[in-house]
Image: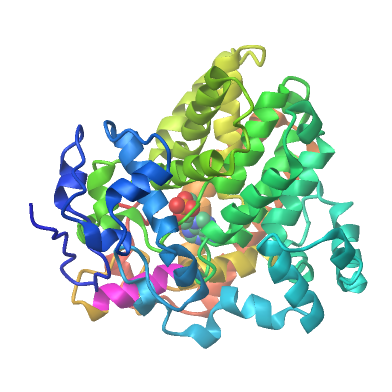
Amino acid sequence: MEVCYQLPVLALDRAVPKHVLSRRGAISLTSSSCLFGGRSPRQLSKRRGAISYDSIDQTALYIRMLDVRLGNFRSEIRGSTSHLCVDFRSLHSGESEDHASNRKQRSKLSLQMYLQCSRSFHGTLTFRHLHLLDQVYYGQAKCMLQRVGTWNFDIFLFDRLTNGESLVCLTLELFCKYGLIELFGLDPLRLHSFLVRIQEGYRSRNPYHNSLHAADVTQAMYCYLQEPKLSESLTSWDILLALLAAATHDLEHPGVNQNFLLKNDHFLASLYQKNSVLENHHWKSALSHLRESGLLSHLPIEDRHRMEERLGSLILATDISRQNEFLSRFKAHLDRKDLNMSSPEHRQFILQMALKCADICNPCRPNSLSTCWSHCVTKEFFQQGDVERAHRHDVSPLCDRHSNSVAIIQKSFISYVVEPLFVQWARFCDTPLSHCMLGYMKQNKKYWSNAAIMRPKPKSLVRSLPLRHSNRL
Ligand SMILES: Nc1ncnc2c1ncn2[C@@H]1O[C@@H]2COP(=O)(O)O[C@H]2[C@H]1O
């Protein structure tokens, strides 16, 4: 079969054979040597050990592995080449303004520390080198970690102090706090290398869906794990799972939404049969990193499988288009007062709700932090809109910079998506933190309402704003 999986509008760097995508049962890789950088698929599959190609799961994992094997992945993140399939470079033309790429430049770290950090990234840092690190900045980062469980934790500052390594530093700290390394007999080096892979697996050029967002969600998840209803009933497995899910929940996000992938017949849309395409991709990517790093390889196979399934159920719950489904179920439980935290099924459900809250908690942060997130997320929407416009496609809802404003998007997002969820979460937790989040949310809503009045709505917005907020359709 012909190797042709052309996107109508965007540049294709590497084609994925259609039969990889369309036939569930069998993947023939023979006609796709271009995918393997000159190596035969056989060689690769041999090197990977036993990869079975007989399920959609393995297909997904294999596609991610190819991404890594080809070295394409890292270079795309570093900005020199492009992604496996879609060339997303046009999304990032305004490089100088890019928040994420500026993070490194804005970092106050010395060159010496930068070099040390990149060595530590690639595993060549020795303990002797650690003494050479710029103590001032690591000292400050360490200091911040003492307050990692506070809701006004400034993740932007923490990221600068750790030279863009907030996800690794924060997650390691939380693993240590909970004693997960000892409890699960984890190899600290494998854990570190797994977290570095995860951090690098986020595209730093995405204004919003980058490793800083993952670090923010992980920090929020930690705050929720401290809530008495959770802390008094969760097991160590639950905690391990919750932290892993938070850290990986948007892994390899391409910086565009599902609607964009569907419209462009992206191979991921076919692979996941147009269902929670991004979330499935995040989950499978997380699995491949978990397996490749061997982090849990010493645990019994049944435990690992259970863990992988549960990880999937958490990450898939972050699909915002399933918000109503989760919210109705949550409300029904709260009305009936029948949540029983000693039931594994109910604990998993509460972890799903906690991750959903952590994922969209940015409007519930203090205004100085919340507004930064609002600008980042809007920037990503508008970049997608610019590409759609440039290719004469319909511009997706919320993505048109000419008919939207940050304020309007925020007002609508807070009212229709955030508030209903956090009101129920506060009903469930009924703690100072849950009410404090509602307080910040109200302040932010007011702030954006005023901003919207000060900056009048573009005329075309009256026609284009959807009734219900969703950037995914
Ligand atoms: N502050 C925000 N304003 C508007 N949309 C948001 C905001 N924060 C998160 N979102 C949206 O909520 C979605 C949650 O799932 P995703 O991370 O895939 O994509 C996210 C964004 O589309």
Q: Is residue 453 above or below residue 238?
A: below
Residue 249 screen position, x and y as percent:
53, 46
Residue 313 within the magenta-colored segment of the rendering: no
Judged from this view, the residue extending furthest toward the bottom is 96
Residue at 32 percent across and 71 percent down: it is: 87
In the image, 441 versus 45, the foreground residue is 45
* Vertical relation: 464 (above or below) 101: above
Q: Position of residue 197 (x, y in %)?
A: 58, 54
**387 in the magenta segment:** yes
Q: From this viewpoint, is residue 60 visible?
A: yes
Say above or below: 153 vs 139: above
Viewer-nearest residue: 407 or 293 = 293
Which of the pair 150/290 is nearer the observer?
A: 290
Magenta span of residues: 380-389
Question: At 48% across and 27% down in the image, what residue appears?
Answer: 309
Dominant SS type (magenta) = helix
Q: Is residue 422 visible?
A: no
Q: Position of residue 146 (x, y in %)?
A: 89, 51
> Does residue 78 appear left or right of residue 110 in this picture?
left
